[in-house]
Amino acid sequence: METSKKGRILIDLEKLNTFGSRSCPVCGKAFELGEAVVPACGAWEGDRYIHENEAVYDTDKGAYYERRFYKEKSP
């Protein structure tokens, strides 16, 4: 499993099997082998893995956030 950016992973077979039939809570698409995902905060409780292109990294907090959630919460 590759982890070049903080928290970022590329989906491998083990992680894909761990996710089972769950899909991305943001776009609804199923996760596929080789896709980049990140643990992000959003309108849900706690962190959930979402596609990296659906996330924004907040350098001040050192965490990823779902784009729409981050935009709504930004001053």
Image (spheres, rainbow, N blue to C red):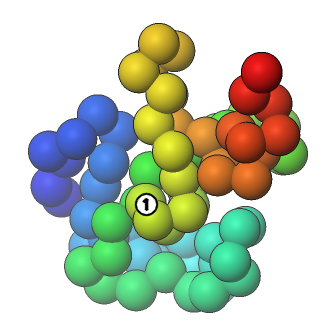
Which residue shows up at 68% across the image and 77% down it? 27
Quadrant of residue 33 within the rendered picture = bottom left
On the image, the x and y values in percent for residue 54 come to 55, 63
- Is 74 on the left or on the right of 57, as rendered? right
Q: Is residue 64 above or below residue 68?
A: above
Please indicate, yes or no, whether residue 74 appears anywhere in the rendered image.
yes
Task: Give the residue displayed 74% in from the left and 28% down from the top.
Answer: 74
Residue 49's spot in the image, x, y percent? Answer: 55, 55
State the residue position of label 1. 52
Q: Quadrant of the C terminus?
A: top right
Amino acid at circle 1:
Glu
Residue 22 appears in the figure? no
**Position of 27 relative to 5 (above/below):** below
Pointer 1: residues within 10 angstroms few (<14), some, or many (20+)?
many
Report the side of 6 relative to 17 (left or right): left
Q: Nearer the viewer, residue 28 or 17?
A: 28
Residue that appears at 70% across and 39% down? 70
Q: Compare residues 60 and 41 and report the one nearer the observer.
A: 60
Residue sitting farthest toward the top? 60
Nearest the viewer among 59 and 32 is 59
Q: Is residue 59 above or below residue 1?
A: above
